[in-house]
Image (spheres, grey):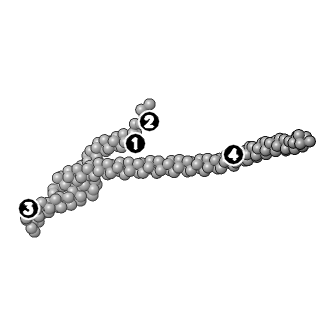
């Protein structure tokens, strides 16, 4: 079925990223309600962000040396909660990217190991086949020697038979010649 081909990990990562938005909203609400969150977690990054932003804008516009007023507590808490929510989404997204990278690397390593194993198996098979070819060549050579030997024996017998016939003819011919001479 299609279930095996469906990228379950990617669907899971997408689900985590979608869940991170409501999680970020809950963190924002908790930051607005809790004094500890507001004072120690939301306000310092918000004031720093405001200071850097205003300083950059002032320099771009050409104003130098003007003092930047800090945000009031409510605006800083709101900005800090927004920054915290965006940081949460960013961290979850970055974590998903890192996990996807690790998963891809693990798949790549697994694939390379399978290829190495297949290559080793093929090399072993080639070695085994080369050995089998050598054995077969030896068997063919050993089988060829007796047949060649038999062939040579047959030729020797044929030559002997021919010599025997000539020898017999040679013996019978001089007697015939001697009888005709008489």
Q: What distance separates the C-alpha of mark 3 from that of mark 2?
A: 58 Å
**What is the tally of numbered marks visible in this picture?**
4
Decide which of tag 4 and tag 2 comes sooner along the chain. 2
Return the disc, 3 or 2, that comes first in the chain's sequence. Answer: 2
At a point 32% along the width and 48% down the height, the residue shown is: 93
Residue sitting at x 65%, y 50%:
134
Q: Residues within 10 Å of mark 2 (few under 14, many from 20)?
A: few
Residue under the image location 38 percent in, 48 percent down: 100
Q: Could you tell me if the residues under marks 4 and 3 are in contact, i.e. CB atoms within 8 Å?
A: no
Task: Kindly indicate whether the residue at mark 2 contacts the one at mark 1 (C-beta within 8 angstroms).
Answer: no
Near-viewer residue (10 or 40): 10
Q: Earlier in the sequence, mark 1 or mark 4?
A: 1
- Mark 2: which secondary structure? helix
Crowd around label 4: few <14 · some 14–19 · many ≥20 (10 Å): few
Give the residue at mark 2.
Answer: 4
Residue 163, given in percent of the width and then of the height, sits at: 82, 44
Q: Which residue is mark 3?
A: 61
Q: Residue furthest front?
A: 182
Q: In front: 79, or 152?
A: 152
- Of callouts 3 and 1, which one flags the residue occurring earlier in the amino acid sequence? 1
Whether tag 4 and tag 2 are in contact, CB under 8 A, the answer is no
Which of discs 4 and 2 lies nearer the camera? The answer is: 4
Residue at mark 4: 140
Q: Which residue is mark 1?
A: 9
Q: CA distance from mark 4 to mark 3?
A: 95 Å
Distance CA(mark 1)–CA(mark 2): 12 Å
Quarter placement of the C terminus:
top right
């Amino acid at each position: 079925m299609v279930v095996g081909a469906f990228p379950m990990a990617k669907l899971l990562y997408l689900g985590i990223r979608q869940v991170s938005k409501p999680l970020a909203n809950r963190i924002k609400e908790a930051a607005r309600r809790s004094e500890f969150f507001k004072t120690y977690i939301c306000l310092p990054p918000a004031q720093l962000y405001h200071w850097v932003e205003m300083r950059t804008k002032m320099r771009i516009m050409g104003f130098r040396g003007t003092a930047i007023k800090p945000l009031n507590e409510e605006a800083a808490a709101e900005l800090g909660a927004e920054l915290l929510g965006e940081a949460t989404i960013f961290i979850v997204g970055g974590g998903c990217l890192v996990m996807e990278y690790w998963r891809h690397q693990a798949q790549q390593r697994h694939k390379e190991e399978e290829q190495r194993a297949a290559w080793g198996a093929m090399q072993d098979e080639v070695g085994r086949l080369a050995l089998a070819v050598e054995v077969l060549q030896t068997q063919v050579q050993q089988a060829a020697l007796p047949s060649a030997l038999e062939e040579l024996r047959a030729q020797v017998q044929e030559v002997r038979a021919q010599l025997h016939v000539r020898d017999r003819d040679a013996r019978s011919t001089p007697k015939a010649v001697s009888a005709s001479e008489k």
